[in-house]
Amino acid sequence: MDTRLCQHLQPELETKKISWIIHSSGSTGLPKPIYQTHNAALNNYASNLNLRGFITLPLYHAHGISSVFRSIYSKKQIYVYSAKLPLTHQNLLKIMQKYKFDIFYGVPYALKLLGESPEGIAALAKQKVVMFGGSACPDALGDKLVEHGVNLISHYGT
Amino acid sequence: MTSFRRPGDKAWDYVRAGDAVKPYLQWEERGPGIFELVVLDGWSSKVASNRSDGSYATKDLFTRHPTIPNAWKYFARLDDTIVLMNGEKVVPNTFEHLIRHEKLVAEAVLFGSGKARPGLMIIPSEAAKDLSADDIRRELVPALNKANKDMPGYAQMTLDMVEVLPVGTDYPRTDKGTVIRAAFYRKFESEIEKVYDSADVPSGELCLSESELKEYIRAELLKILPSPTSGLLANDTDFFSIGVDSLQAIQLRTVLSKNIQTDKNKLGSNIVFDFPSINALAEELYRMRIGGKSNVVSVVDKMQELISKYSVFEPHVAMKKTNEGNYLVSLKSKDSSSNC
């Protein structure tokens, strides 16, 4: 039996259509639209790590939204940090102690907050992968985390 | 690209290109040891190009790992944008131009990539050769104030972040005399680190009681907050709830770190949001000086506090009727068929 529900669509054409548009931040002029085709997006999601995740990145960033779709693609849960809460050491720590994840996604600022206490570092060290993107991580902070057993992974591009 | 690597490889900040993408990446040297990443046409998730051959020059600069092959560390943006630790971006050019215009200044370079806030490196001109660094800083205040007007809130330059190098310091520049930014940051890396270290040393000498601390915090906050917000500031008001933003939180932390004696204990970088009211912050600062266990967040206490705060109901007092006469009250219903 063929379970395809979209017989009227031609895959070759559909993959070239736009799935989402994200805008550059506008730091070097006006924000510019970046068009993401279905083909590019799916290739991007396919490169997932197949891990249950916790994300502190906003979803209006390409890295944030890609991570969410990667989790859907890999059928693994992803927990999203509430944008209504301020990003603090205590809030992050409570969540990480209460739930179990394999991968943590964040900007270096979130790593810095957690890196300020031994409990925060321990919570990061428990993850299989701690992935950061968005900006460079200060050397001293990264060195300290790696020294304490954090599997710190830098992510360039989305 | 990510920095996934073999166990034992400590180069966490060096990203490696996977086999799939590697044929589509080209590294073009832009300065000694500094390469721009160019993504070639054909890579399936590339959606834009800015060159006629269909490739995309990222304007991202990288340096190569000294020993590990195919491992690259992000260095800076080609177009000079400085990305702060929280991801906010600072375009330094206009600011630097205004400061460079001063006759005491030969060169001014803004820095702060990966840091909480930007700083400024000054190389004084010959005209400043008889002045001390502090004198030069003082002379530059009006120019800094003017230049700050064009900068976003998170990038405001404060005097403690201005570092003055000796007159005649040699720095990397092009034939035209303009600074080579990437090389400049590399050369003055340790000076830049020093600026951040000394700005962050708890140097306060004010030994205040808890109630004095509350007054102090309130006074400082009133200087930082815009007046509509400051009207809402009670001792138990949650800072986040009245819209205190991350920049204001950093400003307050800086003032506290500089002035309040905390027995050499460093203030947490997010102390303002971890102790998000005048009461909580005063208590924590007091504890840091006196010692004892940090009373981080007691949910029960917080709830108790909210209950007592919102359990006070003022009874309604009817106004005296001043206008004699007849009134007609008309009720209108949207749905005419209902019986209301």
Image (cartoon, coloured by chain):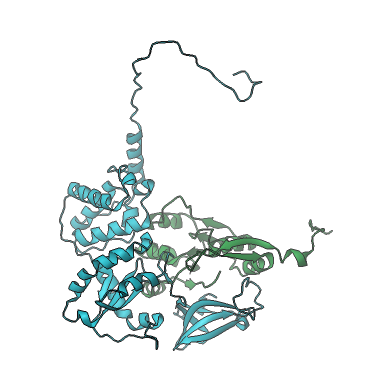
Q: Residue furthest top?
A: B325
Q: How many numbered marks does the figure carry?
A: 0
Can residue B52 be seen? yes
B219 left or right, relative to B314 = left
Which chain is tinted green? Answer: A
Residue drawn at the location 54% of the way across and 84% of the way down:
B27
Which quadrant, please, contains the C terminus of chain B? top right
Which quadrant, please, contains the N terminus of chain B? bottom right
Residue drawn at the location 36% of the way across and 71% of the way down:
B112
Pick the residue in front: B301 or B32: B32
Which chain is tinted cyan? Answer: B
Q: Position of residue B264 (x, y in %)?
A: 20, 64
Q: Is residue B328 above or below residue A84?
A: above
Q: Is residue B139 above or below residue B220?
A: below
Q: Position of residue A53 (x, y in %)?
A: 53, 61
Pick the residue in front: B338 or B314: B338
Residue drawn at the location 28% of the way across and 67% of the way down:
B144
Pick the residue in front: A99 or A44: A44
A55 left or right, relative to B113 = right
Q: Position of residue B266 (x, y in %)?
A: 26, 63
A83 left or right, relative to B226 = right
Can residue A122 be seen? no
Q: Position of residue B313 (x, y in %)?
A: 35, 27
Pick the residue in front: B195 or B143: B143
Asked which quadrant contains residue B80, the reply is: bottom left
